[in-house]
Amino acid sequence: MMFNLFKKKKPIARFYSLQEGVADLHPIIPTASVKRPWIKLPSNPHPNDGSIATKNCPGIKLMLNAGWVLTAPADFIITTDGDGVNFKYSEAQRFNLEQGSGQDKYIDFHDQNQTERILDDPSKSLKTVVKIHTPWRVELDDDYLLLQVPVHYSNEKRFTPATGLLDPRYAHVLNVQLFWHVLNGEELVKAGTPLIQYIPIPRKAYVSSHFNFICDEATDEDRKMERSFNVPSNVEADKISAKIDNGVLKVLLPKAKSSLGRKISVK
C-alpha cells in the first residue's frame, strides 16, 4: 500500500457555540443549504436569445455555494415607531457569553453617532444599527480571513448585515450588525433565519500589493480571444452564419444531420 506523504491537509474552519443546544437546533450551515424558493421555479430562458436562466448563471451559482451562513440562534422582535432612529426589542432568549460575569446578551445597538455617516441612504435605514450578540466563535486556518456579506438572493428586505472582513487571529467573536429597513412597524425574526454569510478568502488576497496589478488596453491576442467561443460538438461548423439585426449579433448554429432525430413511419 502506498501513501501520499505530500497530500495537503484541508484548512480548518471550526464554528463553535458557547450556548448549549444552539449548534444542534440552529447551526451555522453551508450557504448552499439556505432555502431559496425561487430556485425551484421553472427555468425561463431569455425569450429573445435563449440565454441561461438566472439560477444557472455561473456567478450567482458560485455565490450561492460560497462559505457558510450564520442563522438567528433565537427569536427576536424589533419594533420601530417611524422616528428613523430608535427601536424597541424583545428576545426569546439571552446568551451567557462571558462565563461567571452574569452578562447575558442577545440584542444590542450601535447609536447613530457611530453609524449614520456610513449609511448609503439614511432615509431607508434606521440610523441606529441593530447589533446581534451570538454565542458563536470561529477558529480558522491562519492563511484565511472571513469576508462577511449579506445573504444574497434570499429575498430578505427587513435588514441588511454590514459587510466587512473578519480576521480570526485577532477577533474570533461572531456578532452581526444589521442595518434595519423597517422604519415603522413590528417584525419578528424567527430562530433559524439567515443573517449573514461568511466566505473564506486567502489572507494574501486582500492586500492589493500582493498582486502585479495591470490596467491597460486590450492586445490583439485579447481581441482574438474576445471573438472566439466554444462551438458545440453537434454543430455543422462550416454552415455557421452570423448577422447584426438592430444592433444585436445573431449567430446561427445548424445542428449536424447525425444529431437530428430520425423520422419513423408507423403503419
Image (cartoon, rainbow, N blue to C red):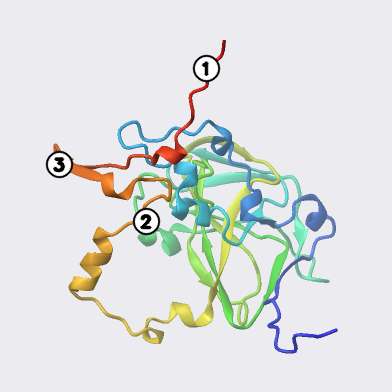
- Of mark 1 and mark 3, the one earlier in the sequence is 3
Q: Which residue is mark 2?
A: 230
Q: Nearer the viewer, mark 1 or mark 3?
A: 1
Real-space Cα distance between discs 1 and 3? Answer: 44 Å
Asked if one can make out residue 81 in the rendered structure from this viewpoint, the answer is yes
Real-space Cα distance between discs 3 and 2? Answer: 22 Å
Q: Is residue 168 above or below residue 2?
A: above
48 left or right of 218 in image: right
Say which amino acid is labelled 1.
Ser
Q: Is residue 139 above or below residue 134?
A: below
Q: Where's residue 251, x and y in %?
A: 26, 43
Question: Residue at point 28% right, 59% down?
Answer: 228
Q: Which mark is residue 265?
A: 1
Q: Where's residue 82, x and y in %?
A: 44, 38
Question: Residue at point 44% right, 57% down?
Answer: 112
Q: Is residue 256 above or below residue 151?
A: above
Badge 1 element:
loop
Q: Which residue is mark 3?
A: 247
Q: Nearer the viewer, residue 113 or 183?
A: 183
30 left or right of 227 in image: right
Badge 3 element:
loop
Q: Nearer the viewer, residue 263 or 197?
A: 263
Q: Where's residue 222, x and y in %?
A: 24, 69
Q: Where's residue 143, x and y in %?
A: 59, 82
Quadrant assignment for the N terminus = bottom right
Cβ–Cβ below 8 Å for labels 1 and 2? no
Residue 19: image quadrant is bottom right
Real-space Cα distance between discs 1 and 2? Answer: 36 Å
